[in-house]
Image (spheres, helix red, strand yellow):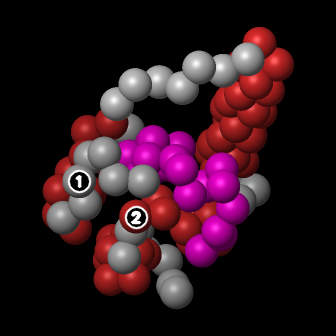
Amino acid sequence: MALPNLTQEAKKHALAKAQEMRRARSRLREQLKKGSLDFFQVLAAEDEVTARMRVAYLLRSLPRVGKVKAQRIMEEIGIDEKRRVQGLGKRQKEALAARLGGRR
């Protein structure tokens, strides 16, 4: 698939949007690490920032969950390592909630 030819203005707009998404993901991860934001609220949210995050990246944002533990959780539930939050099914979200000790 060939990439579209963008004008300079379109490129600048795309770069600005990408930077804002990275900042928003960073803020979200920081709030999760501090505990000021609940993981299950994030799963239930339907905003663009959350929806496009990879599940593994989101799990690693939790306190005491690193790369290995996140991978193990995803394998137990049957979530592909490249799956994004928007691609999770209802059962997968429920399994994550049960595995992490939360309520839905």
Q: Is residue 52 magenta?
A: yes
x, y percentage for residue 68?
26, 39
Q: Is residue 31 magenta?
A: no
Residue projecting furthest to the bottom = 104
Q: Residue 80 shows which numbered tag? A: 1
Q: Of marks 2 and 1, which one's residue comes earlier in the chain? A: 1
Q: Is residue 51 above or below residue 61?
A: below
User: In this rendering, would 52 be left or right of 10?
Assistant: left
User: In this rendering, would 50 be left or right of 69?
Assistant: right
Q: Residue 87 shows which numbered tag? A: 2
In front of the other: 91 or 46: 46
Q: From the image, state whether disc 2 or disc 1 is nearer to you.
A: 2
Crowding at label 1, few (<14), some or many (≥20) Cα neighbours within 10 Å? some
Q: Is residue 87 above or below residue 83?
A: below
Give the residue at x 48% y 63%.
86
Q: Please, what secondary structure does the residue beneath circle 2 have? A: helix
Span colored in magenta: 44-65
Amino acid at the residue labelled 2: Gly
Give the residue at x 23% y 53%.
80
In front of the other: 80 or 2: 2
Give the residue at x 56% y 58%.
51
Which quadrant, please, contains the N terminus?
A: top left
x, y percentage for residue 81?
26, 46
Q: Quadrant of residue 87?
A: bottom left
Q: Residue 88 shows which numbered tag? A: none
x, y percentage for residue 77?
22, 67
Crowding at label 2, few (<14), some or many (≥20) Cα neighbours within 10 Å? some
Q: Is residue 100 above or below residue 23?
A: below
Q: Is residue 16 visible?
A: no
Q: Quadrant of residue 37?
A: bottom right
Q: Is residue 42 visible?
A: yes
